[in-house]
Amino acid sequence: MKTKLRKLLAFITAILMTFSLAGCSTGDTNTSRSGTNTNTKNNTTDSESLRGTTIRVFTHMGQRVLGEEKKDDQGNTYRDESTAILKHLAERFTKETGINVELNVVTNEEELRPYFQVQDDYVDVYTCPNWSLEEWKAYAEPYCTLEEGIELYGEYAKAMPNVDGYIYSIMPGRAYNQAVVYNEEVIKAAGYNEIPATLEKFNEMCEKIKAMGIIPIVLHRVENWPLATVQDFAIYVSGNPTVFAECLKTENPFSDTSPFGKTIKMYTEWKAKGFFEPEVFPDFGAAMDSVAYGRAAMMLFGSWVVPQIQGRVPKGKDPSIIKFAPAPDFGAGRYVLAAPADNWAISKFSKNKEAARMFIEYIANDSQFIADSGFIANKKGVKPIVPELYAIIDEMVEKGECKVILQPPNDENALNNQKVLEEAGLYADYKYVGLLFDALDITKPDDWSEYYKQAETLNQLYARYKNELGVEWKD
């Protein structure tokens, strides 16, 4: 059974893309191409003893393996291999250490879950981030203690996936997360030189862009995961970094009178106003193309999407027309979220854990790779390189026009909130947002009756399972 499953899944991922790379390394953490200093606390690996080992790396960041999607002069899509930065890093790692790296592209967690459910050792390293904390603990090897993580990564370590004092997925970068990724040419055509500072002015800009026949905001609603940005935008709406966990403080977290429910309502109002794409894009690549080509104005996403869209800008256009700026002030101040970035985990069932750890540490020590990925190297002793895409936000923060707010840690309140949502059947696939967002009938945008019914249903489910679990907010 296990062998058949492995062969089937390996065949599927091979269709997507598999690279085998071969080669040895040492280094120090003060340079951008620093080699494999793997001296995390209480861990030292002898690379020579691992020469010839092969590790299998599964990543959802396909453009870093295959290269960015671009258009040729005839408008045909191709992969620019010069931008396949993970492939190039793996080649360097192999050359320096003698440890072979096989890169596999997967689209989501569902392609990995069958391996883990049967405790298959086929996966060594993986990046897919959308696991529950329960699944991180079940499927990932503890990477280090939370205390060790804080020593190496500062307060950002507290926001990495951690349970019972252990970090299960190390995040070597940091980033400004969930802001406005926009095409400067489009907003200038609408009469704006920058993203407006208030919600009222932001909505006015979207109306003008819509009147131009251009999509104001690309959501890519073919899946639920883009709605996860609501969770971070709720921080901006409330000015409170623990707003999501604080659902525990109320019996009606999904009503528009509660901070989290208010944010979902705001997104749904944008839907009612026609600010999102009228027809669902078939895939995320097509959605990004729409911003790159000026058929849409913006996306509300993290910094990771900026270099991808810049790489899709038509030939002859300056990629820097794609910019990154803070979201408007929704009433509580103008904020930008600072968060750890880029999940890397070792499979609990891997037989090559030492080699896997060496590979992840090699990444953590390479500030240029991290910068090229759209993040800032954050490991102690590694000199960071700040990507140009952060220029607007850095300047606004320096002037006091925008405040940095740190992503909250996964503490007991966060865990309990997640447990309530899981028990209520709302956590998987972000149903706690999706069910509400989809309740509004776009053919009747002024009729909110079904939305409010759905909000009440979600509130009742939340209250019921919060009571059954016996959990409350703890100061």
Image (tube, rainbow, N blue to C red):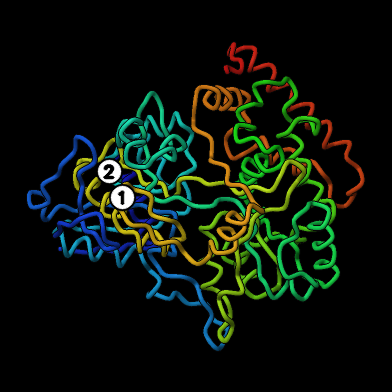
Q: Are the residues at dot 2 and dot 1 in contact (C-beta closer than 8 Å)? A: yes
Few, some or many C-alpha atoms within 10 Å of disc 1 (few <14, some 14-19, many ≥20)?
few
The residue wearing badge 1 is 7
| Residue under the point 20% across and 54% down | 36
Between the residue at mark 2 and the residue at mark 1, the CA separation in whole angstroms equals 6 Å
Kind of residue sitting beneath label 2: Thr
The front one of 50 and 238 is 238
Residue 415 - label: none
| Residue under the point 54% across and 71% down | 310
Q: Say whether residue 110 is visible.
A: no
The front one of 150 and 62 is 150
Kind of residue sitting beneath label 1: Lys
Using the image, determine if residue 145 lies above or below residue 446.
Answer: above
Which quadrant: the C terminus?
A: top right
The residue wearing badge 2 is 3
Looking at the image, residue 204 sits to the left or right of residue 307; the answer is right
The front one of 414 and 77 is 414
| Residue under the point 44% across and 28% down | 134
Looking at the image, residue 195 sits to the left or right of residue 99; the answer is right
x and y, in percent, of residue 272 in the image: 84, 51
Looking at the image, residue 90 sits to the left or right of residue 405; the answer is left
The quadrant holding residue 27 is bottom left
| Residue under the point 31% across and 53% down | 382
Circle 1: element type: helix
x and y, in percent, of residue 282 in the image: 63, 62
Which quadrant: the N terminus?
A: top left
Using the image, determine if residue 32 lies above or below residue 169.
Answer: below
Looking at the image, residue 434 sits to the left or right of residue 391; the answer is right
Few, some or many C-alpha atoms within 10 Å of disc 2 (few <14, some 14-19, many ≥20)?
few
How many numbered discs sit on the rendered protein? 2
x and y, in percent, of residue 473 in the image: 61, 18
Which residue ends up furthest to the left in the rendered image? 49
